[in-house]
Image (cartoon, rainbow, N blue to C red):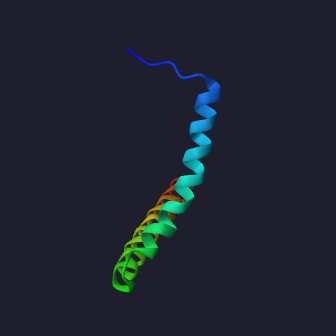
Amino acid sequence: MAIRISPEVRAAMAEIARKTGALGGKTSAKNMTAAERSERAKKASLAAAKKRTADRLERERAAKKRK
């Protein structure tokens, strides 16, 4: 059984989530040591590089198919 939420309540909940969500990263970074922050940044950097590589390879495959 689904619970119906009014549009006004849904909008208010979304606004609260936006405000508190933006603070999450800053707060967690403040509570971490320098080594933990560095480890997290390296993990994020590797994930971004992996995604860029996958996107580039997909574009190259698509270009080969067009030829």
Task: Say which residue appears at 54% left-offset and 23% top-offset.
Answer: 5
| Residue 26, placed above or below residue 59 | below
Residue farthest toward the bottom in the current orientation of the protein: 34
- Locate the C terminus by quadrant: bottom right
Residue 3, image x and y in percent? 45, 19
Task: Say which residue appears at 45% left-offset and 75% top-offset.
Answer: 30
To which quarter of the image does residue 45 belong? Answer: bottom left
| Residue 15, placed above or below residue 60 | above
Residue 60 or residue 39, whichever sits in front = 39
Residue farthest toward the top in the current orientation of the protein: 1
Task: Say which residue appears at 56% left-offset and 38% top-offset.
Answer: 13
Residue 23 or residue 46, whichever sits in front = 23
Answer left or right for 42 relative to 11: left
Residue 62, image x and y in percent? 52, 55
Answer left or right for 61 relative to 8: left
Answer left or right for 62 relative to 50: right
| Residue 66, placed above or below residue 56 | above
| Residue 64, placed above or below residue 11 | below
State whether residue 52 appears in this view: no
Count of numbered labels shown in the rendering = 0
Task: Say which residue appears at 34% left-offset and 79% top-offset.
Answer: 36
State whether residue 12 appears in this view: yes
Residue 60, image x and y in percent? 51, 63
Residue 27 or residue 55, whichever sits in front = 27
- Locate the N terminus by quadrant: top left
Residue 52, image x and y in percent? 49, 67
